[in-house]
Image (cartoon, rainbow, N blue to C red):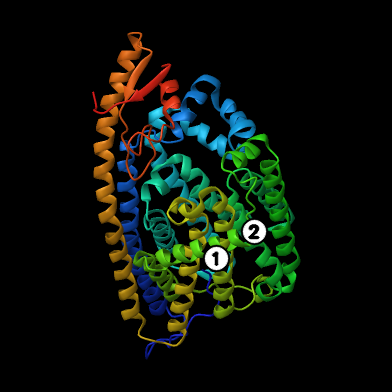
Amino acid sequence: MAVGASSVTVPPDPGREPGSAHEEEGGEARGSRTAAWTTGLALLPLGLLAAAAWLGRYVRPSADEWCFLPVVRDEGISGLVGRFYFTDNGRVGNGLLVGLYAKFPVAGHQWYGLVSGALVLGLLWALTAALLRRAGQRVPRGVPLLVAAMITAVFLFATPNTYKTFYWPAASVSHTLAPVLACAAAVPLLRSRGRRGRIAALVVVVLAGVFMGTLSEEASVVALVVLCGVVLFAGRLFTERARAFARGWCLAGMAGVAAGTLLLVTSPGSRNRRERFGAETTSMLAPESLIASLRGYVRILETVLTTWQYAGAVAAGVLLGLLASRRPGPRGRRVLLPCRPLLLTGLGAAAFLVSGYLCTVITYPVFGPRVVTAARTWNDYLLLYVLLLVAAGAFLGRALRLRGAATGAVTGLAAALCAVTVLGLAAPLYELGHDMRVRAQKWDRQDRWLRERAAEGARVLPYTPVSVSGMLEPFSANGTRIWPAQCVADYYRLDRVTRGTRLP
């Protein structure tokens, strides 16, 4: 994403001396106009995010959350963390985040989209600003917000199943928030100054690594691949004065991830999960599993690479490259080597392809051929893909700017593509909002009826499945899939629920 070359020198107008008041006023005026229109353009993805958050009021519990809610109600957040570690999957970090929203049953689900969306946007905004500053680049005021907003919108809403990516909290904390939190661990490093700052950066990355290891196996794999790449190629990325610390920071992060992953995989819950899905007897490194994973990953790439809305990330990057310029300052303080676009893009592409395949390998024993349709598990490496597209766009914009091309026309085209992308993401979001509203009305009606009958002393009641976006419900697949019927019964304090054929 960083662009690291000096800006083009524009000759002064005839009759004006360099540095004159007229030139300074003209530069300030151009900067103000650019800040104004980039901020205005950022309102489009921000508006999309606001609309998506507003639709969050139609989210209701489903799938795994039927099982989480009774545990948190009866045993608290610590009870859910303990259940995750000893019984379910070993993900204690995941259990903590799930418990934070499950503590507020339905309201927690309704507010989750707003809170998580704001968190993702804020962290990516901070990361963009810190990365530009560390790379010695300055941009008009609205550009970092525009870039972060476009990354957030494309990442959250360009996936095949937006509900499971953004609205389903149980999936979001594992596969949507996790990679963003991993990226945010780099912010203290990028902003560090002096010995205390470096120590703080090391502490943060170790703690973040441990937490990541207990939150998401896939996000941990992506983090390990990226950090390993930085260690191997630090000599081509950083100046000599910064190289040793950059490698040390990456190794500290890798150690933290390894410690967290070890805590997860040795837990009783992780062992139970592997036995439940038959993963104990199926080696993910077996040749047939590796080949099947590769086939599945190729199909996933076909879907991702043909999703045109990701072009909005490239357009945001082009705007960044066109509008960035070298921040004045002593060269001796730089930590990054001069920009090498082909090398950086190639390394980023390799990290995306390798981490994506490895994520498919570790999920295949659990999902099998369904890994191709389990789009929520792609998000752990799709954030890296979106960041790569932004970086490639920034390098393209920088190259055009340095060659003195007609940047005005390119700027207009890139801004238009950003706008078209947002519109392209808005249409399916509107349709999803309608489906969520219909489901919420049915869910609320059945919820009131079940609570009333339970309060009257009923012990067995019928439940009619009410699903949205392929979410699992009791008695789905024409009644052949019972799970999570017993969790629904526990939620309403019943002995059991039977299959209902019509809503009350």
Q: Quadrant of residue 401?
A: bottom left
Residue 352, x across and y down, in percent: 55, 65
Residue 214, x across and y down, in percent: 63, 43
Q: Is residue 254 above or below residue 483?
A: below
Q: Is residue 486 left or right of residue 420?
A: right
Q: Is residue 71 above or below residue 241?
A: above
Label 2 sits on what residue type?
Answer: Ala
- Residue 302 in view of the camera: yes
Local SS, label 2: loop
Q: How many numbered discs sit on the rendered protein?
A: 2
Local SS, label 1: helix
Residue 342, x across and y down, in percent: 55, 80
* Quadrant of the frame with the C terminus: top left
Identify the mark at residue 286; answer none if there is no mark: 2
Identify the mark at residue 484; answer none if there is no mark: none
Please report whichever mark, 2 or 1, sits nearer to the chain's N-terminal start: 2
> Residue at (30%, 37%) from the top-left corner?
58
Residue 491, x across and y down, in percent: 43, 22
| Residue farthest to the bottom, as pictured | 14
Label 1 sits on what residue type?
Answer: Phe
Q: Quadrant of residue 313?
A: bottom left
Q: Is residue 177 above or below residue 295?
A: above
**Label 2 CA crowd tier, 10 Å (few <14, some 14–19, many 20+):** few
Q: Is residue 420 left or right of residue 160?
A: left
Nearest the eye: 156 or 66: 66
Q: Is residue 298 above or below residue 67?
A: below
Q: Quadrant of residue 493?
A: top left
> Residue at (41%, 46%) from the top-left corner?
164
> Residue at (41%, 28%) from the top-left corner?
485
- Give the mark toward the camera: 2 or 1: 2
Residue indicated by mark 1:
352
